[in-house]
Image (cartoon, helix red, strand yellow):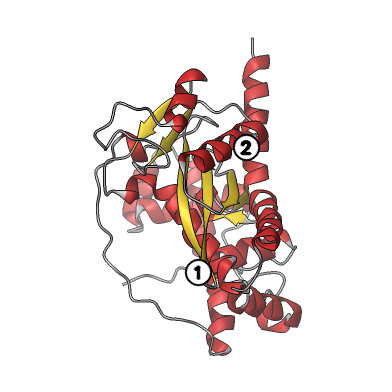
């Protein structure tokens, strides 16, 4: 059972220990544990007293007193479909200091909290396709997403850099090697850094390596001529292109789910361009520790300049 020592007794022990040469005998005499004594001693040296100071916060941070914060939490959760960690970081950037639990409490009190059933995640081998990349442009994943516009189907070609999560998106009306090559040229032209390798699945728009032909796909041919390393994921394993697949899921949830399906292709291209700009410059990315892609690139560039200036 924990003993309740008086302040006078604690002070007597600490001051006595500072005077004596054998602290062990003193502690044994009064049956005091070493850990307890050193806690008192540390507090005495830091504050000059052994009194238990109040742990009560100096300022009240009750989120329910801030209606502006409550409205923002509800808006981000219901309209923007953001998670509790994203909301917390977003509010902190807006100058509203709040924790994840407080976000939960606001949503629960508003009867908006969606309880999730935890699913057991599959474990995959950590091979080269899913290794962590720190160098910008080292691997860029490219994939194709099918978009239904009424009765018409168009195709979104998407590229994502693994190190920075910088992304590119373009809409094409067909899924051919010509479209894939046009998109690759667009990525290389607009990239803020040099791209070293490109990783795709084995779709016919990217490669002919899975069919019996001697002809080389123009996408592969262009990569070979421009010294771009080609990486192919195993057949029927989209998880190895997991980053770009995840981006497709985000696009569906945050962009296409709010889109009028009767929109024209030209207007879709304009809106997708605006969304991509927002994604690369303003959206907080969970895999980067809830910072923006713009901040991530800035951090990498600053780190590079620091290293280059070192003797």
34 left or right, relative to 303: left
Q: Which mark is residue 186?
A: 2
At a point 31% along the width and 52% down the height, the residue shown is 28
Nearer to me, 139 or 46: 139
Report x, y in % for residue 226: 52, 20
User: Dividing the picture into quarters, in which one does residue 130 lie?
Assistant: top left
Q: State yes or no: discs 2 and 1 in contact (Cβ < 8 Å).
A: no
Question: In the rendered image, is residue 254 in sight?
Answer: yes
Residue 200, percent from left and from top: 40, 40
- Circle 1 sits in a helix, a strand or a loop, which is it? loop
**Residue that appears at 58% across and 63% down:** 86
Q: Nearer the viewer, residue 24 or 229?
A: 229
**Quadrant (top left, top right, bottom left, bottom right) of the N terminus:** bottom left
Q: Residues within 10 Å of mark 2 (few under 14, many from 20)?
A: some
Q: How many marks?
A: 2
Q: Is residue 191 above or below residue 124?
A: above
The disc at residue 6 is 1
Q: Closest to the observer: 174 or 13?
A: 174
Q: Is residue 267 left or right of residue 43?
A: right
> Residue 3, relative to residue 27: is it above or below?
below
């Amino acid at each position: 059972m924990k003993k309740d020592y008086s302040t006078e007794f604690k002070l007597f022990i600490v001051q006595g220990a500072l005077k004596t040469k054998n602290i062990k005998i003193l502690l044994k005499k009064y049956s005091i544990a070493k850990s307890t004594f050193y806690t008192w001693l540390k507090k005495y040296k830091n504050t000059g007293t052994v009194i238990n100071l109040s742990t009560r916060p100096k300022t009240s941070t009750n989120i329910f007193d801030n209606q502006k914060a409550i409205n923002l939490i509800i808006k981000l959760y219901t309209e923007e479909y953001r998670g509790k960690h994203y909301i917390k970081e977003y509010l902190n950037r807006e100058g509203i200091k709040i924790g994840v639990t407080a976000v939960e409490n606001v949503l629960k009190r508003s009867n908006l909290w969606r309880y999730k059933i935890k699913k057991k995640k599959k474990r995959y081998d950590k091979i080269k396709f899913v290794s962590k990349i720190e160098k910008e442009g080292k691997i860029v994943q490219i994939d194709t997403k099918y978009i239904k516009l009424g009765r018409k189907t168009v195709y979104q070609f998407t590229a994502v850099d693994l190190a920075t999560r910088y992304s590119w998106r373009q809409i094409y009306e067909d899924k051919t090697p010509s479209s894939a090559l046009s998109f690759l040229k667009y990525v290389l032209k607009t990239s803020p850094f040099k791209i070293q390798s490109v990783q795709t699945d084995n779709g016919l728009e990217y490669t002919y390596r899975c069919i019996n032909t001697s002809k080389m796909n123009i996408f592969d041919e262009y990569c070979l001529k421009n010294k771009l390393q080609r990486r192919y994921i195993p057949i029927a394993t989209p998880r190895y292109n997991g980053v770009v697949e995840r981006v497709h899921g985000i696009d569906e949830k945050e962009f296409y789910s709010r889109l009028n399906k009767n929109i024209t292709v030209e207007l879709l291209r304009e809106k997708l361009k605006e969304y991509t700009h927002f994604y690369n410059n303003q959206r907080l990315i969970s895999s980067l520790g809830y910072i923006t892609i713009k901040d991530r690139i800035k951090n990498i560039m600053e780190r590079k300049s620091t290293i280059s200036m070192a003797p």
